[in-house]
Amino acid sequence: MNKIYWAGYHPERSVQAKGILYLKKKLEEIYPNNLEFKFVSDVGDLNYNAIDLLRLVEEGEIDCCYFFSSYLTERVEELNLFEIPFQISSRDQVYTLLDGTVGKHISQKVEDNTGYKVLGYWDNGIRHISSSNRHIKSFDDCKASSIRIANNKMHEDVFRAIGFEPKFIDVKKLKDAVISNEVNTQENPLTNIINYGIENYHPYITLSSHLFGTSILLCNKKKFYDWDQEFRDNLEAQLKEATKYQRTLAIEEDITCMKLLKEKGTKILEIDPAFRNQLKSIAFDIGKEEIKKFPKDIQKKFNELI
């Protein structure tokens, strides 16, 4: 009996959970009588914080998860290539990098430096800024805002440099922090803003497109190589199909979320391109040393796309 235990940190209506359920269905078709696929959509239901998933998978209590790749950069600095805000805003740009030699290079670095095997990269949405009291149109708006960020030093350094007061808060506690005004600003894809109910308290959204959220698919390394070759091959093949499906859902989700937010009366503003270019320059100066750590061919591929 092939057994796989997968967990996430979003509700079942999310594009990540739907992607895993698609994968589950495809594998069950291949192994109708020889597969036990357990999936917990939100690890918070097991009384864990979202960030606990990384430990649970690496220690083997859970086999696989997806996770926002920014949380792994302290251990795998190569992932910082995608964590310099305001550099990339196009999905096609990111897919080109992740699905080619850049993605393979990073995957190998993850495997070399952690207890994970990378199974792929999914679309966690293009990230924007929401606020309880203003659009982000100037450096003064940044200086007047405390912003919830992911647990990532690059994000912290950049947001602080442009004037924000950044603060990491786990996803499990994010909504409470927004309701209590512990932070008056936060950054997330539109789908997360709706999934977490943030739009009810943040009527202002600035379409900053400051980061593409990469969901890295992680498997406990020992578990992966303990599976027989046939199962590994089938898993990887079906993950390729699930990746196409999940990315399509993510693109459709942005359109759906934008419509819902407008119907709700959310005040949505596209960031001024000139202001964004200023922010891009500041962020690049902070992140350029990370880019230099990559092999020359990867630096070239990245610089050509930004």
Image (cartoon, rainbow, N blue to C red):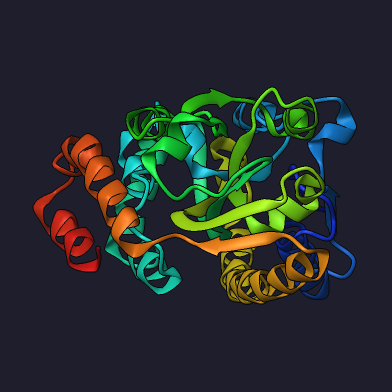
Q: Quadrant of residue 277?
A: bottom left
Q: Residue at x 64, y 27 (%)?
A: 183
Q: Nearer the viewer, residue 285 or 67?
A: 285
Tell me the quarter of the picture where residue 26 sits.
bottom right
Q: Nearer the viewer, residue 37 or 243?
A: 243
For this rendering, which residue is in front, 294 or 192? Answer: 192
Q: Position of residue 167 (x, y in %)?
A: 55, 23
Give the side of residue 10 with respect to residue 146, left or right: right
Which sits in the foreground, 13 or 283? 283
The quadrant where residue 287 appears = top left
Q: Residue at x 57, y 36 (%)?
A: 222
Q: Tell me if residue 273 comes above or below residue 241 in the rendering.
A: above
Q: Is residue 107 above or below residue 165?
A: below
Please, is residue 6 above or below residue 25 in the view?
above
Percent x, y of residue 215? 56, 52
Residue 140 rendering spot, x and y as whole percentages: 41, 36
Number of callouts: 0
Left or right: residue 111 compared with residue 26:
left
Quadrant into which the C terminus falls: bottom left
For image coordinates 53% across by 31% down, the residue present is 145
Answer with left or right where residue 155 lies relative to residue 120: left
Q: What residue is shown at x 31% (from left), y 47% (from top)?
A: 279
Q: Extreme left residue here? A: 296
Residue 172 is situated, as x and y percent measured from the top left of the image, at: 76, 31
